[in-house]
Image (cartoon, rainbow, N blue to C red):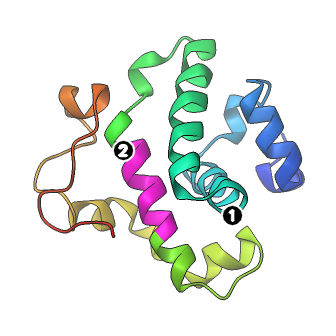
Amino acid sequence: MINHFDLTDNEFEIEFKNCTLSPSMFNHEAHLRLAWIHIEKYGVETAIKNLCDQLLRFVVALGATDKYNTTLTIASVKMVNYFVGQSNSSNFSDFVSEFPQLKSNFKGLISSHYGIDIFNSTKAKKEYIAPDLLPFE
């Protein structure tokens, strides 16, 4: 099995967009990488639109639509964007090393913005819920 790091950013982006990326490669870190790539290439607003569209297509192709969460997708991109603004890194590997909490404490970071459990909320899965504790911007 190969790792998402075995693909260039461009290969990774294209394989995901075309739903040809192996699902075994698409872990939490790969989600973060996809957000980072899209923010760097297209800016945060287009990254949000792209990732919402592409993630939904990906889970539909896998028959796993219950895995898609609109609020979590948008919140994740906004969170990654915040850290991109603080970063000195020029590649994802350095970026994720610079901000290890994105991998090690992601749920804690999300919880600092939301008083509700957006991971399991039916409403959050279907539509974007703005943070009620701390805004992302």
Point out the tag, 2 or 1, that comes first from the N-terminus. Answer: 1
Instruction: Determine whether the residue tagged by mark 1 lies in a helix, strand or loop.
Output: helix
Q: Residue furthest bottom?
A: 88
The mark found on residue 72 in the picture is: 2
Is residue 51 in view from this perspective? yes
Residue at 12% x, 48% y is 116
Residue labelled with disc 1: 40
| Residue 5, x across and y down, in percent | 81, 56
Q: Is residue 16 left or right of residue 129?
A: right
* Amino acid type of the residue tagged 1 in the rendering: Glu
**Label 2 Cα neighbours within 10 Å, binned few <14 / some 14-19 / many ≥20:** many
Q: Decide: is 130 above or below 15.
A: below
Magenta span: 72-81
| Residue 105, x across and y down, in percent | 38, 68
As measured in the structure, the alpha-carbon distance from the residue carrying label 2 to the one carrying label 1 is 20 Å
The chief SS type of the magenta part is helix
Say if the magenta span includes residue 20.
Answer: no
| Residue 71, x across and y down, in percent | 32, 41
**Label 1 Cα neighbours within 10 Å, binned few <14 / some 14-19 / many ≥20:** some
Instruction: Determine whether the residue tagged by mark 2 lies in a helix, strand or loop.
Output: helix
